[in-house]
Image (cartoon, rainbow, N blue to C red):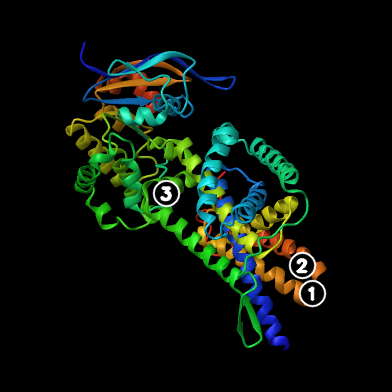
Amino acid sequence: MANQLLEVKGIDVSYGDIQALWDVSISVEEGTIVALVGANGAGKTTLLKTISGLIHPKKGEILLSGKPLSNLKTQDIVDLGITHVPEGRRLFSDLTVLENLKLGAYTPSARPFFADSLERVYNLFPILKNRQNQRSGTLSGGEQQMLAIGRAIMARPKLIMLDEPSLGLSPILVKTIFDLIGTLHEQKLTILLVEQNVNQALKIAHQAYVLKTGQIVMSGRGDELLANEEIRKTYIGERVRKR
Amino acid sequence: MSDVELIVQVFINGILFGSMYGIAAIGLSLIFGTMRIVFIAQGTVIVLSGYFCFWLFHLFGIDPYLSLIPIIIISLLLGTGFYYGLFKESAALKDRIGSLLIAVGLMFFLENFMTVVWTPNPRAVVTSYGFFAFHIADINITLTRLIGLVLAIVATLGISIFLRKTLIGTAVRATSEDAEASTLMGINPNRVNAVTFAIGIGMAAIAGVIMATTYSFDPVYGLDFAIKALVALTLGGIGRVVGALLGGILLGLISSLGAYFVGTDWSQGIVFAVFLLALTFRPYGLFGGGGAGEKA
């Protein structure tokens, strides 16, 4: 078996009395792009939050390079190399672009490399350098998404989890974001991608999982799932032609 | 003394007194901003600091302004202790009712503690230079009140610089805007909250020394102080440090000018009428936009 960076093994997650995830297992091989697709409310964000340690599973375990994460705090998980770009970007809008990036490199393992990381982010997104002293709330939607991803890169992650990065962006910017995900992949980052743009996500993903009402109902290579009639009908909205 | 001179005198007193509300409000603002805790015991902590100042002066002859050094150090430790000992759980759960009840309990405890230790009689720190005043025309400005205003301004600027220039200060501002997102940066929420609490109590301690050198006080004076600081905070806008100081000064002016023009009996009533008007029409504060307003 190839080198698994992240393994989620049979987790159950609940919010109070309401169970959100049932016996969910996924694994993310190092250096790949893994997509997580499914309808609204299927539990995709919950799974990311659980991996980040914002929520703790009732059952099961989560391993990063074989090391258990399930009972660690978020700050330790970030420090070990998992960063989570949440849905809606969640920038600190009152803070400047540079201040947002500084906080991205807050952890003890990332802080000493701040200058290098900043250069890397500015090379990826030159526009952010021009805007570094501007309040992040004044950026355009596309720039905000770049900053959100740049801020995550500042943490020098091994695994970057992107929750709906293309949500609310224009078609041109959606393409930019997917190109960028490709670039991050070329830079040897491992990516766990949650997307409502199922077609694009499956095209780019090496491996994909389909979540439905809190359970993994299907998994396979991205191109396999993309060819699956059920997937095309349910998530891509394509009419299946009858002969 | 002519009417004009009297009004100017009232005006100046309002500013001097209001600056004390202002720095108390800064502490409340930071604590509410990051932890959503209404720290109603803030005024009582101010009085406690006043008593420390009083003790250091009477028992050891330490000048009240020199006593700022040990008092600030003690207050930072006390603030950290309050957070870890009393408020950590409710901050994590964003339980505003729970934290408010704890703060009320702390306030009554401290009031009773101070009554036992220092008796309910009013105290004041009266130094040899306490009555020294500058006279310009017929207007008097006492030295201690002027020092109080300078201290308030210096403390406000100091906190502003801390929040802007240091990484932990930036983390405090980020947490105040979006606590969950700041956790995702790897920022330890407990550490940020404890630092914020320490600073909040530190500001109360400075306000306490200003109070002790300019007015007499008793153990139950704190609640009134905390409520005035809440009004100042509302006027200034939550999460805005300089706004809170300006809000306090504005409140001091409204209170003293109201007392002069309408009557002392009405002074409190006017303050709260302004509070209600501000909440109705400018809920994010009078200065600047709604950027740092509370997020649900």
The answer to whether residue B35 is left or right of residue A242 is right
Q: Judging from the image, what secondary structure is the residue with disc 1 in? A: loop
Residue B286 in picture, x, y percent from top left = 59, 64
**Residue toward you, B177 or A228:** B177
Task: Tell me what residue is drawn at x 19 percent, y 47 percent.
Answer: A123
Relative to B193, does residue A185 appear above or below in the rendering? above
User: Which residue is at the far front?
Assistant: B60
Task: Tell me what residue is drawn at x 60 percent, y 34 percent.
Answer: B86
- Reading the image, the residue beneath label 1 is B262
Chain bearing mark 3: B
Chain bearing mark 2: B
Using the numbered discs, state the Cα–Cα distance from disc 2 to disc 3 in whole angstroms. Answer: 37 Å
Q: Judging from the image, what secondary structure is the residue with disc 3 in? A: helix
Residue B138 in picture, x, y percent from top left = 66, 86
In terms of image quadrants, where is residue B134? bottom right
Amino acid at circle 1: Val
Using the numbered discs, state the Cα–Cα distance from disc 1 to disc 2 in whole angstroms. Answer: 8 Å
